[in-house]
Amino acid sequence: MKTCNRCKIKQSKDNFRLRSTGYLYYLCKPCEKINNSEHYQNSKPKPITVEEKKCSKCNRVKRAGLFYANRTSSDGLQSSCKHCWRQYTAEYTKNKYSTLKARLERSEKNKMKIKETDILREILELSRGSVRLFRNNVGFDAGNKVRYGLKPGSSDLIGWRTIEITEHHIGRKVAVFAAIEVKTPTGKVKEEQQRFVDYVDECGGISGICRSVEEAKALLNLS
């Protein structure tokens, strides 16, 4: 037995239509027919009750034939005239697709965007022969209250390049401190990072801000 949601009568399950999902319909078969008939009547366009109407967009009074039908309105007509409605839909479609195009372009741009870690990884591959570079992670472990890294603002890569000098150091190899701050082509350099790079340079070390592997090669004087 099952109770119909419309007539509230408890009936045999045979009086209910079996849905494709395997469950019985919530209305009995007679009530379902009545419900479908009412829905059909409500879906019919309402009779037009006016001969003229003022457009809500251009504010001009036009004859009823210049408006699209609308069964939900009291007079059976749309609030805007056909001309204004066509302009609105054309502008809406144009803006919709231009917004979609811009969104797709931004998505493609983000896919092609260069990451700082990618540049850093490529520069680290230069660490061979006379050049030795090491990753310098700087930060603060709040749990253990310990700072790690060389110092706040110190460069991403720390190392040296071994060179041979003349005069009394003839034949002796000297390791020159190197500090490379890695940034993307549009990445901003913090004030403390710039100060550290300048300080290393003043002390005779090799230091600079590199936005590509080519800039790092030029800084380290690698052919």
Image: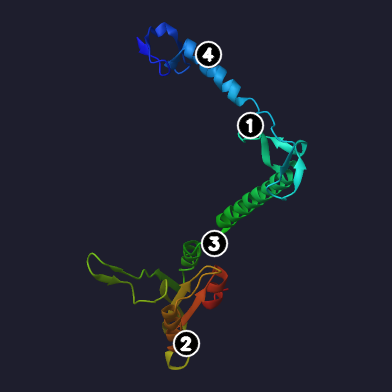
* Image location of residue 60, percent across then percent down: 75, 49
* Image location of residue 156, percent across then percent down: 42, 71
| Residue at point 75%, 46% (across, down) | 61
Location of residue 13 by image quarter: top left
The answer to whether residue 221 is visible is: no
How many other residues sit within 10 Å of disc 1, few (<14), some (14-19) or many (≥20)? some
Element at badge 2?
Answer: loop
- Circles 2 and 1: CB atoms closer than 8 Å: no
User: Disc 2 or disc 3, which is closer to the eye?
Assistant: 3
Left or right? Give the position of 102 relative to 202.
right
* Image location of residue 72, percent across then percent down: 60, 34
User: Disc 1 or disc 4, which is closer to the eye?
Assistant: 1
Left or right? Give the position of 209 relative to 196.
right
The residue that mark 3 highlights is: 114
Give the spatial CA distance, label 2 vs label 3.
38 Å
* Image location of residue 125, percent across then percent down: 48, 64
How many other residues sit within 10 Å of disc 3, few (<14), some (14-19) or many (≥20)? some
The residue that mark 1 highlights is: 71
How many other residues sit within 10 Å of disc 2, few (<14), some (14-19) or many (≥20)? few
Disc number at residue 33? Answer: 4
Disc number at residue 165? Answer: 2
| Residue at point 48%, 16% (across, down) | 20
Q: Earlier in the sequence, mark 2 or mark 4?
A: 4
Location of residue 25 by image quarter: top left
Identify which amino acid the numbered label 2 is placed on.
Ile
| Residue at point 71%, 46% (across, down) | 55
